[in-house]
Amino acid sequence: MSTLTQPEWAAVISEHAAEDQTARKLIAQLLALEIASLAFCRLLEKWARGDAEPSTPGRRQAALLLEAAT
């Protein structure tokens, strides 16, 4: 694994997984989901404040990808 700090739940998954490779894949997928979810929530908060930019679906998708990258 990398030197990044893993959430506590990652250790639990690793300890109880039948195979290490399966645990690593699941942890990576769950971390990606967590990051994308937080980015989406930040984007929704911006829109709730009245910052309706970006206003089109394509621009919203681009903004969501940009938020996930930061």
Image (spheres, helix red, strand yellow):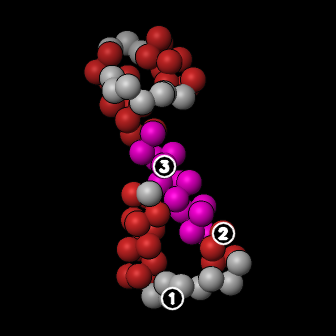
Which residue, given by chain and number where applicable, does mark 1 sit on?
A: 55
In terms of sequence position, does the residue under pointer 1 or pointer 2 come before the other?
2
Q: Residue type at mark 2? A: Glu
Q: Which residues are magenta?
A: 31-44
Residue 5 in view, yes or no: yes
* Secondary structure found at label 3: helix
Label 2, label 3: how far apart the Cα atoms are:
15 Å
* Secondary structure found at label 1: loop
Residue in view at x 47 percent, y 12 percent: 16
Decide: few, some or many residues near mark 2? Use Cα within 10 Å; few <14, some 14-19, many ≥20: few
In terms of sequence position, does the residue under pointer 2 or pointer 3 come before the other?
3
Task: Tell me, yes or no, whether the highlighted magenta stretch contains residue 35.
Answer: yes
Residue 8 or 16: which is nearer the viewer?
Answer: 8
Residue in view at x 45 percent, y 68 percent: 64
* Secondary structure found at label 2: helix
| Position above or below: 56 against 39 | below
Which residue, given by chain and number where applicable, does mark 2 sit on?
A: 45
**Magenta segment, prevailing SS (helix, strand or loop):** helix
Residue 53: x percent and y percent?
Answer: 53, 85
**Where the C terminus falls, by quadrant?**
bottom left
Residue in view at x 57 percent, y 23 percent: 8
Residue 46: x percent and y percent?
Answer: 63, 73
Which residue, given by chain and number where applicable, does mark 3 sit on?
A: 35
Q: Residue type at mark 1? A: Ser
Location of residue 24 (image quadrant): top left
Residue in view at x 68 percent, y 84 percent: 50
Residue 17: x percent and y percent?
Answer: 42, 15
